[in-house]
Image (cartoon, helix red, strand yellow):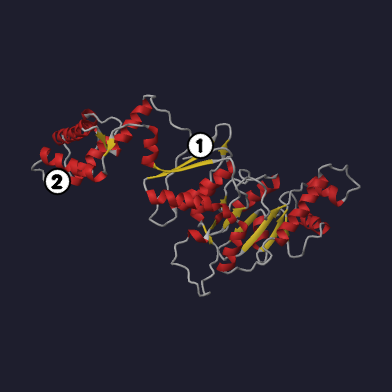
Amino acid sequence: MIPILPENAARFRPATAALKRLHGFLRRLPWDDTRAWLSFSPDGTLPNAPDFLLVDADHRAFLLSAADLRETEADDFLQPGLFAPDPRLAEKITALRATVLTLSHFAADSSPTRVLVFPSLANKRAREIARRLDAPASLRILGNDDFPKALAETPSTPLSAHDLNTLRARFSPENEVPASFLPRLAPRDDGRAAQLTPYLLDFLQESWVKNDLVVDEAAGVAASGRSRLITGVAGSGKSLALLYRARILAGLANGKRFLFTTHNKPLIAELRWRFEHLGTALPAAPRFRSEFTHFHKWAASLDRDTRDVIPDQERITRIAALAAEVFPDSGLPRSFFVEEVAYLADQIDDSLDAYLALDRVGRGVALDAAMRRRVHGLYQRYRNSLAAGRQTDWYFKLRILWERLAAGRINLPRYHFI
């Protein structure tokens, strides 16, 4: 089976029975290292493009469109005087002629193999229909007779990497990354600046962006309801994939509210700027609200607590000073105590009994019961020192916020996507 993006043909655009059948044909192709894309508009409308782009391991590119015509409709079209006319047939033939035009003229400056597929008809009948429609000779006509073999035997010339990238950008403009997003040196003004081919999301990024994007309008949330974790080294495109996914969701989810939050102030400003500039590739998505904010700023806006939040360096220095009093001869680095205090502050139950029951292995220190009692005592002393000065740190501020939320003393704003 070959991967097709998006996975479900009916989720992002109007889908005929023929489109769904062709989607199934392509998924079952026994070709290695082959990928396919379904054309769609991020606002859910019908795109002005062929239905599928298929690229195999040899860089052969196929543009395929599904012809929505059943056997009885084909008989009526070929022999109009013998059968009772179907009132919808004229409409279908008009749509089929438009499909032929779109497939013939899309990306006319490139040379992919263009295939018109009749998933409900045999190959011979499909070719008869195409002749009656005066389909250009450049189109390959296929039916449902041994589709994998017929497509494999269809003549096709491999495309260069440049031409293939250009074709992909034309077919899936929602994948194109604006040049302003790319890191580069200051542009030269001598007229010799390089002309880049379109820069696209890679297939893994695109998979995460497009798959499982169904919006449950009744519930007002993503139908899957699951959280997702993206991992990757710096510069691997995590934030880029997140923005594209959110921007496409914005087109599918009118009136929904988005929250973007990070612990990095420069990053949140960059995310806001990039999100606004994605409109060059994606259709406008009115009637959605987005909020970009640093996580601590967002949390502080929910709880107007008057205690001062101490700087992080002061937090570390204070814990280290208290640890020197509680553990004068331990020889442990101060980072150990700072991390244990932070760990305890993150626990819903920060009591001594809960700490004694926790499985704290892999710390490089034998945290037996006696050691844990002393560490918990350090935790309490640090917490008391904050309370005495009407102070807090971000660990405890968020902890207090959580406790007040759990007690129903604070109401969270409603977001559909975070």
Q: Which mark is residue 230?
A: none
Badge 2: how crowded within 10 Å, few (<14), some, or many (20+)? Answer: few
In the depicted view, which residue is nearer to us: 142 or 258?
Answer: 258
Front-most of 209 and 136? 209
Verify CB contact (< 8 Å) between mark 1 and mark 2.
no
Examine the rendered structure and indicate whether residue 167 appears above or below residue 188.
Answer: above
Residue at which label 2 appears? 332
Residue occupied by mark 1: 416
| Residue 31 in view | yes
Horizontally, is 175 left or right of 109 in the view?
left
Residue at 57% of width from left, 37% of height from top?
Answer: 255
Of pointers 1 and 2, the one earlier in the residue sequence: 2
Quadrant of the rendered image containing residue 339:
top left
Q: What residue type is labelled 2?
A: Leu
Give how far across and how far down residue 412 sits, in percent: 43, 31
* Rendered residue at 39%/35% (across/down): 301
For residue 168, above or below residue 349:
below
Category of crowding for the residue at label 1, using alpha-carbon neighbours closer than 10 angstroms: few (below 14), some (14–19), many (at least 20) = some
Inspect the image, locate mark 1, and give the three-letter code of the amino acid beneath it: His
Q: Is residue 90 left or right of residue 50?
A: right
